[in-house]
Amino acid sequence: DGSHAHLRPSHRPCGSGRMPRETSTLTFVIVGDDTPIYECELRAGGKREDTINYLHEFVLHAALDNVEETIWTTPNSYLKAVDRYYDLTVSAYTTSGLVKFLLLHDGKNDEGIRGFFHDLHEYYIKVMLNPFHTPKTKITSKDFDAKVKTLASKYLL
C-alpha cells in the first residue's frame, strides 16, 4: 500500500530526550516517486558529507507518510515541520509535480528553511528543464551540489 508507518520510530529510550551528536547536522533529500534522487548531509562550515547517516535516512523515510498526508491538507508548497524524532525535526516542501524536499534539522528556523526550499526549488526546475534529465533520474551535478551548499550556508548554517 506504500505506507511507511511500520518504519516510524515508536518509542524513545529513557534518558535526556536528546540525541548525542558531535556537531549540528542538516540532512537534505529530494524524493521523487518515493525514491531519493538527491541526498546530502551538511555540517556547519559548509562541509558536505559523502555518506548519509543511516539514522537520519531512517527518520526521513519514516516522515514520508506524514508528508503524503499533509500534501492534501494545505495549498502551500512549504509544509513546515512534518515529523520529529528526539530533538530532530523533519521539514518538508513539495513541488506541483509532488516531488518532495525533506530537511532533517535541529533548532527552529522556519523563515530560513522556507527561503532555502524556495530558492532550491527554482534551481531544481532548471535541472529538470535539461532534456536528458527525468524526474526519476538521480541528480549528480556538481553545480547542483554547489548550489545546495551555497543556499544551506546562506539560510541554514
Image (cartoon, rainbow, N blue to C red):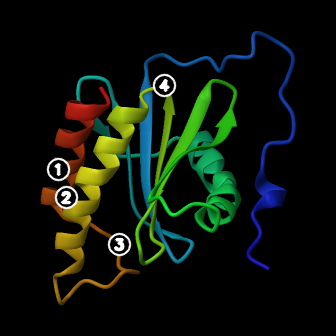
Query: Marks 4 and 2, how far apart in space?
Result: 25 Å
Q: How far apart are marks 2 and 3 (CA)?
A: 11 Å
Q: Residue at horizontal 18%, vertical 81%?
A: 129
Tell me the quarter of the image containing the C terminus: top left
The residue carrying mark 4 is 108
The number of discs equals 4
Q: Can you say whether 114 is above or below 105 in the image? A: below
Q: Is residue 41 left or right of residue 89?
A: left
The answer to whether the residue labelled 1 contacts the one labelled 2, judged by CB atoms less than 8 Å apart, is yes
Q: Nearer the viewer, mark 1 or mark 4?
A: 4
Q: Kindly identify which residue carries mark 2.
A: 144
Q: What residue type is labelled 1?
A: Lys
Identify the mark nearer the N-term, 3 or 4: 4
**x 57%, y 60%: residue:** 74
Q: Is the residue marked by circle 1 packed among few (<14), some (14-19), or many (20+) residues within 10 Å? A: some
Cα distance in 3D space between marks 3 and 4: 29 Å
Q: Residue farthest to the top?
A: 16
* Residue 125 position (above or below residue 23): below
Considering every residue shown, the one lying at the far front of the view is 75
Residue that mark 3 sits on: 138
Q: Which of marks 3 and 1 is nearer the N terminus?
A: 3
- To which quarter of the image does residue 61 belong? bottom right
Which comes sooner in the sequence, label 4 or label 2? 4
Check disc 1 and report the residue beneath it: 147
Q: Is residue 45 left or right of residue 93?
A: left
Secondary structure type for disc 4:
loop
Dot 2 surroundings within 10 Å: few (below 14), some, or many (20 or more)? some
